[in-house]
Structures are given as C-alpha cells and as structure tokens.
Amino acid sequence: MRPGGGGPPRPRGGVRAAGSGGTTSLEVRISGDGDGLNLELVDEFPSLAGTRVNCAGGPTPWGSWLSCEEVTDGRRDGFGKPHGYVFEVPVDATGPVDPVPLTAMGRFVHEAVAVDPETGIVYETEDAWYVPLVPNRPGAGLYRFIPREPGVLAAGGRLQMLAITGEPGYLTAREQTQGTVLPAHWVDIDDPDPEDAGRDPLAVFKQGLAKGGARFARLEGAFSGDGGIYVVSTNGGDATAGQVFHYRPVSADRGELTLVFESPSPEVLDSPDNIVVSPRGGLVMCEDGSGDQYVRALDREGRIVNLARAPLGPEGEGAGEFAGSCFTPEGRVLFFNQQGDRRAGGTVASATYAMWGPWGDGPV
C-alpha cells in the first residue's frame, strides 16, 4: 500500500522543527483470491515527519509517493522552517526519509498531484476557496510541473498554471455546461517559491491569475487516466456540491479541459475530495461534505454509485471525512482512510479500510 496522509504514530527521527504532519506507510500482504482473499498487516511506520497538514498527494510511476502540505505558514508563524511544499517518499522506504522540500514545484496550499506516465509531468491541485465578491477568496489554480529531468523532481523544473484560451481569468466554478470542451494553454509561474507566501497563501496563484490563469473552486483530488488527468472541484458548480474535470493534452503547450460531471445536489454527490481511477475505468471519490459521507463512484455511463457510508461515532457524531483512496497495482483491493476527530482529546479514531470485489461484476 502506498503511503497516506496523517501524523506518524511513533516518531523516530527526521523531524523538522514544529511540524507534526507526515506520512505513514503500511505494508500489507495479500494472499488467496475470491472469497478466500486474505489481508495481513505486516508493518506500519512513519515514512515522513516534520511537515505540516499533509493532504492528498499522489503516486509516481517511478515508485514513490508525493506528499503535499496544505498550508504555507513558516518562520513568521513560529515554525522553524517555511512550509507549503511537496515532499517525495520512496515506496521502499523502511523509516522516515529526509524531508527535503521540492521548492521548484511551488509553495501554495497544495492538495493532490497526478503524474503523466508518458512525460513525467506532475499536475498539482490547489485547495483554495472561491467565494463571490470576497477579495481573499478568488479561487484556486491547476498547475503542472515540467521536470528538468523526468523522474528526478529534485533536479528542478518549470511551474505553470492552466489558462482557458481567449478567456483570461476564466471562472470554471459557476454556470458551466457538462460535456463542454474548453481550449486551454499554460502560463509560466515566474517565482514558484515567493518570499511572501508565508503571509499570503495565494502568492503563487496571483502570479498565474495576472497572466490570465483560470479560477477553480477548491481543487482537491487528482489522478491520471484516459490520456489525461482527472481533477475534482470540491465545492464547484451551481449547487456548490462538486465538479469533475478532465484535462487532456493535445500538444506540448495546449490541451482541452472538459467538465465531465457536475453534482446537482449534495444528495447525489457531496463535496468530492480524494479520487482514484479504478483499473476498470470508473472514478472512485471520497466525500468531504457536511451530511452523511460516502465513498462514491462515477461509472463510465456517468452514474453515481454508492460504495461505502461513513460509520457514526460513539455518540452519533460523524466520524470524519473519507480520504486517501488507492487500489493495489493489480486492482483487486481498494484501500481508503477516514479522518478521525481533529480536536485535541477527541474520541473518534481514524481508520484505514480495505474493500474488494468481485469488481468485474459491478460498475467500477
């Protein structure tokens, strides 16, 4: 199983000052098949520590996990080092890796990443709000990082932000038509690690917006599939219940952005967050809304399917959002996490779940 977000259960080295986030790696042995499938937890250990508010992240084709910080605070906030970066964790790590920030990939409110397996380009989402007429809530950007050396992100590269061709500052979050294909191009971010990002989380976004970059509402999950990248806008759409987009490159500098699905109400799909493409082509989404929370799927016919409902806490309270979904390489088992109580002294524990088929008999 790939590393997932969350604080390490037993810190042992590799800690940056005042950072309590990181990743925990689970080693799971799978044996048998069908009704006889058996899962055994072999080991679990912190694989990244000292970071802050690690969010979705994502896998790479070269055998690592990219973990993303969802805050940009730093020294001025009392922390020993600046935060707001992407970190890489090799899948074969046996303990905490050195937390080296990949500064060229940008310092902003990160959520997820998805890697194009053909080019090694890394797409990055930004979890920033769009609220009409509120100056400090102008929206979020969709970024891509073109590495100088594919597969070696620490060697640096170029950060860019998506723009809709002919429509500077285009707002994707409202008044969109499902199925519409928008021509897109990319604008350079001149300073991916701006000095003022600690006090202004939108410092990178504003650079892209000034060059005509598109505005989304809280971009969260991202995953590679169907010749491009799927991303979700958690509270985009006229019902503010969520949108699913697919970006497909058509050349080195241009592509097409398609609104694949827009939720008409929270009862259908409520604030999609982490996502993963199933080996059979469906899109599995973890909800992060205000009511009952589900792991739901968008099948190839455009239908929403319920896979799992969040259990309630000991006193009937919600157990927290679903997150961190991923399939085993052969596609037999789906893992997903659930955040527990995020309050100090809270009583609801977090959990990791496994779900398996027969997937071939269903829509995802």
Image (spheres, rainbow, N blue to C red):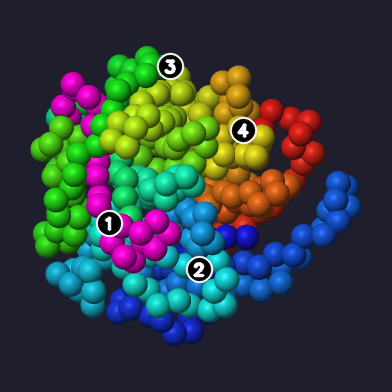
Q: Which element is circle 3 on?
A: loop
User: How far across and down, in percent of the image, does residue 200 sit?
Assistant: 15, 54
Q: What residue type is labelled 3?
A: Gly
Screen quadrant of the C terminus: top right
Mark 2 Cα within 10 Å, few/some/many (few <14, many 20+)? some
In this figure, which residue is indicated by the disc labeled 3? Answer: 179
Q: Which mark is residue 157?
A: 1
Q: Which element is circle 1 on?
A: strand
Q: Which of 269 and 35 is in front in this view?
A: 35
Give the foreground label among 4 and 1: 1
In this figure, which residue is indicated by the disc labeled 2? Answer: 90
Horizontal placement of 38 versus 247: left or right? right
Screen quadrant of the N terminus: bottom right
Q: Are marks 2 and 3 in contact (CB under 8 Å)?
A: no
Q: What residue type is labelled 4?
A: Gly
> Distance from label 4 to label 1 (Cα)?
31 Å
Give the residues in magenta: 148-169
Q: Earlier in the sequence, mark 2 or mark 4?
A: 2
Q: Which mark is residue 340?
A: none
> Distance from label 2 to label 1 (Cα)?
20 Å
In this figure, which residue is indicated by the disc labeled 4? Answer: 281
Q: Which element is circle 4 on?
A: loop
Q: Which amino acid does label 1 sit on?
A: Gly
Q: State whether residue 236 is above or below residue 93.
A: above
> Distance from label 3 to label 1 (Cα)?
33 Å
Horizontal placement of 293 versus 355: left or right? left
Q: Do the residues labelled 4 and 1 touch (CB within 8 Å)?
A: no
**One can see residue 129 in this view:** no
Q: Are marks 2 and 1 in contact (CB under 8 Å)?
A: no
